[in-house]
């Protein structure tokens, strides 16, 4: 199954959901807070402000974790 993801650069707008799940699991093993931000942003469609409020952290923390997580996904998914 493939799905469009507007928050990460993808090849032709599609990402393999199994590969995405595996990448998120790997990220969670190393950086759980980062994995939460990525999951809420990519799968939940939440904004930075919404995630910051939900996780009770600053927007700058969310942005930092998002940058790290996004780079990790791009690397893991070979995008």
Image: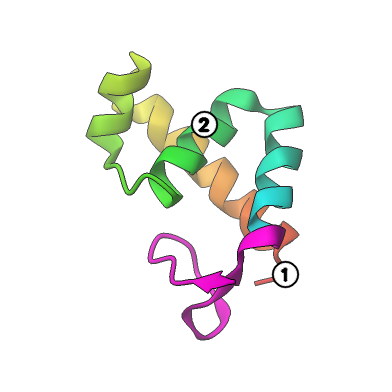
Rendered location of residue 4, percent (x, y): 44, 71
Q: Is 53 colored magenta in this rendering?
A: no
Residue neighbourhood size for the residue with mark 1, other residues' Cα within 10 Å, grouped as few (<14), some (14–19), many (≥20): few
Residue at 53 percent of width and 77 percent of height: 14
Residue neighbourhood size for the residue with mark 2, other residues' Cα within 10 Å, grouped as few (<14), some (14–19), many (≥20): many
Q: Secondary structure at mark 2?
A: helix
Q: Is 18 colored magenta in this rendering?
A: yes
Q: Which residue is mark 2?
A: 36
**Depth check, front residue: 13 or 64:** 13
Q: Which mark is residue 14?
A: none
Q: Earlier in the sequence, mark 2 or mark 1?
A: 2
Q: Which quadrant, please, contains the N terminus?
A: bottom right
In space, the residues marked 2 and 1 are separated at their CA atoms by: 21 Å
Q: Secondary structure at mark 1?
A: loop
Q: Is residue 61 above or below residue 66?
A: above
Q: Is residue 79 above or below residue 73?
A: below
Q: Assess whether mark 1 and mark 2 are in contact (beta carbons under 8 angstroms).
A: no
Residue at 70 percent of width and 64 percent of height: 77
In this view, the residue farthest toward the front is 1
Q: Is residue 74 above or below residue 59?
A: below
In this view, the residue farthest toward the top is 56
Rendered location of residue 54, percent (x, y): 31, 21
Q: Which residue is mark 1?
A: 78
Rendered location of residue 7, percent (x, y): 41, 60
For the record, the magenta segment spans 1-19
Q: Is residue 53 left or right of residue 10?
A: left
Residue at 42 percent of width and 39 percent of height: 40
Total numbered badges shown on the rendered structure: 2
Residue at 27 percent of width and 42 percent of height: 47
Rendered location of residue 74, percent (x, y): 63, 61
């Amino acid at each position: 199954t493939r799905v469009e993801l507007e928050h990460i650069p993808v090849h032709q707008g599609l990402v393999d959901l199994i590969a995405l799940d595996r990448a998120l699991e790997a990220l969670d093993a190393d950086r759980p807070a980062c994995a939460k931000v990525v999951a809420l942003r990519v799968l939940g469609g939440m904004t930075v402000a919404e995630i910051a409020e939900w996780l009770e952290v600053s927007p700058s923390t969310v942005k930092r974790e998002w940058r790290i997580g996004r780079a990790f996904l791009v690397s893991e998914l070979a995008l």
